[in-house]
Image (cartoon, helix red, strand yellow):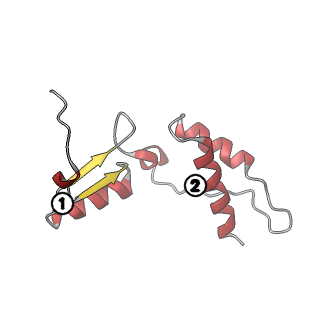
Amino acid sequence: MAYKPHSKSDYDIIVLGYGSAGANAALQAAHLGARVLIIEKAKRGGGNSFVSSANMTVPTDYDKKDKADGKQFAQYLGQVAQGTTPPAVINAFVEGEYEMFE
C-alpha cells in the first residue's frame, strides 16, 4: 500500500499511543462520530497495558523517614519498557509516583 499524506482536516482527533487509555479514547471518539487517527510507536498496540498483566506498578521502597531515590524502580521500568521509553520520561514518572506518597 502506498503512503498517502494526510492533512489535519482529515481527522477530528489524533490519539498518540494505542495502550488502554489511547484505545478507549479512540473508540469513544469514534463512537461519538469523530474521525480518529491512532499513532503508535510500537510494532503492535497495547502499550504498557500489554506488558502490565493488568497490574499497577507503584514503588514499594518508599519510606517517609528515608525517601528512596527511585533508582531501582526506574531501572525496573526501563527493563519492562524494553527500550521504547526514553530514560528522562521514566525518571519523570518515578518522581511523580513518589510525590503521590507525600
Residue 97 in the figure: left or right of residue 8: right
Q: Residues within 10 Å of mark 2 (few under 14, many from 20)?
A: few
Q: Which residue is tagged 1? A: 30
Q: Position of residue 20 (x, y in %)?
A: 37, 55
Mark 2 vs 1, N-terminal side: 1
Residue 4 in the figure: left or right of residue 102: left
- Identify the residue at image location x=68%, y=49%: 73
User: Which amino acid type is marked by label 2?
Assistant: Thr
In the rendered image, the vertical position of residue 49 relative to residue 25, given as above or below:
above
Q: Secondary structure at mark 1?
A: helix
Residue 70 in the figure: left or right of residue 85: right
Seen from the viewer's position, the closer of residues 69 and 57 is: 69
Question: How far separated are the C-alphas under marks 2 and 1?
Answer: 30 Å
Q: Which residue is tagged 2? A: 57
Q: Residues within 10 Å of mark 1 (few under 14, many from 20)?
A: some
User: Which amino acid type is marked by label 1?
Assistant: Ala
Residue 67 in the figure: left or right of residue 77: right
Q: Position of residue 41 (x, y in %)?
A: 39, 39
